[in-house]
Image: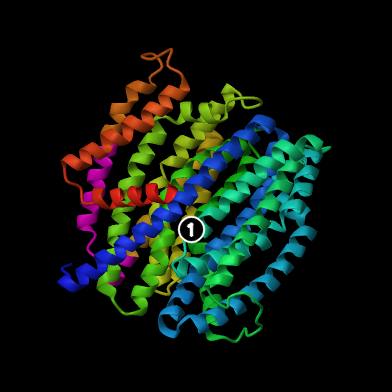
Amino acid sequence: MDLPASDRAAASSRYTRILRNAAVVGAGTLLSRVAGLIRDQVTAYYFGASLAADAFFVAFRLPNLLRRLLAEGALTPAFVSVFSDRLAKDGPVRVAAFFRSAVTLLALTLTGVTFLGLWLAPELVLILAPGFRSDPEQFLLAVRLARILFPYILFISLTALAMGALNSLGRFNIPAIGPVLLNISMILGAVFLSPKMEEPIVGLAVGALAGGILQLAIQLPFLKKAGPFLGLSFDFKDPAVKKTLKLMAPAALGVAAYQISVFVNTQLASLLPEGSVSFLYYADRLVQFPLGVFTLALSTAVLPALARVRAKGRMEEFESVYLSSLGLQFFITLPATVGLLVMAEPLVALLFQRGEFTAQSTLATAEALWAYVLGLPFLSGTSLTARAFFSLSDTKTPAKIAAISLFLGLALAVGLMWPMKHSGLALASSLASMVNFLWLNRVLGLRQGYNFRPLFKEILLSAFWALLMGLFLWPLYNTSLWPTLGNLPKVVLGLILGPGFYFSLAYVFKCRHLKPAGLFLTRFRGRKK
């Protein structure tokens, strides 16, 4: 596709702004992920992969799944698309009225959902973890924790709406920092509240609920400063509200396919030996680190930008920004994938192997991580591609494709869980993510007339460089060659030598994504300061 000079300049300028905003989100997300790793280390130290830990992770899955389905999965993409469109066409006053109506409707709906969840907590726990039926003590603990945690969905969903509005208004700083508060609150709950509780794991649940409240509270002053956004409005007949609701239902499945597969994996893992739920949780947390720092950051910045471009009818610029973002996504996630594959075991041991988390737990978690990380590039790409569809006001196509991918993932999970145990469940999720991504881009390419061949060549080249990086790092993690080298030196050397080797290859071959990646990192470093 050859754009006129003026359109190329506009696309380049918008892409640069996207990268800068993504760097802000990435910086905040990195802080959150680091705090999250410390939180998981604290959790592993105090509770390991025990009966109580499994009960907590199952209970926390309930509000987390609803958050990702209702807030992040359904509401945020649909809301940001409509919000950005109205902001571009009607200005800040009308968009503020729409926001107040959306907040009121969401608060009323989720209050009802919260009370329903408190009432149906026993049934929901059995749906999520049917294996708990055989252990009444674990089942009752999971129900108790679920009732403490369920109000979290109300606060975190309202937070997601506030963050979406601030991002659409070009304010990314505070929304990016908010999640840090959740992790800090959970750490404090585990360290200071748990020892005072009859059942120590309850302290961790109380910390999680407090973190959800804090995340909402920190957004409110900035919304007030941005305009007349605070307040209630019962104008549910607003066309923008109706359009958001229309887009929400299919968007829930379209974005949250991976989360639903994690939900199903938790169900199936409860039927496997004790600790299986925890192994999958810890492995998924490590995969979420690169997903959050770069993938979520870029996707968050891309959605309002693409929605504004589409509202102005500049589809050539839309294509240019989307394909450039997707290429950069793979340029970053492919070496991250190979790096996690190579140093999975020492990384897990370094982060979690202490207290109740044994060497056997490390190996089992590393096995799950190997399987999960194979789907990392495709899961990252799906997040970005789904947002491209949302920007085009199409949430049905991602939903249909995600539904089929989910059924495929479920069939694979059932078939792989017995021979491969918990790692088979993780592998099934990765394969389903791959199918979802490839199918989405096939449909988008045919519908919009995109030429993916140049992008495909770039991805293959990035994959080749990442493979060479893995071969370069492999001797470092071969214990027979370095029997006395500890986990900390292995991880630190890998984090230095691996990216250095990969980006050196990219520099030698003049990869076009090296400059945007450098811009991202430069902006990221500036925001940290």
Closer to the camera in the image, 354 or 283: 354
Q: Decide if residue 204 is on the left or right side of residue 465.
A: right
Q: Decide if residue 368 is on the left or right side of residue 214.
A: left
Q: Give the residues drawn in magenta, as a range.
A: 444-467
Q: Residues within 10 Å of mark 1 (few under 14, many from 20)?
A: some
Residue found at the very far right of the displayed protein: 198
Closer to the camera in the image, 470 or 317: 317
What secondary structure do most residues of the magenta stretch adopt?
Answer: helix
Closer to the camera in the image, 521 or 52: 521
- Per the image, the residue denoted by label 1 is 173
Residue 397: image location, x then y, percent: 43, 68
Q: Is residue 393 above or below residue 135?
A: below
> Can residue 382 be seen from the camera position used here?
no
Q: Is residue 315 above or below residue 123?
A: below
Q: Quadrant of the N terminus?
A: bottom left
Q: Residue at x 29, y 48 (%)?
A: 518
Does the magenta run of residues contain 366?
A: no
Q: Is residue 515 above or below residue 80?
A: above
Q: How is the image coloured?
A: rainbow
Residue 319: image location, x then y, percent: 28, 67
Residue 93: image location, x then y, percent: 51, 83
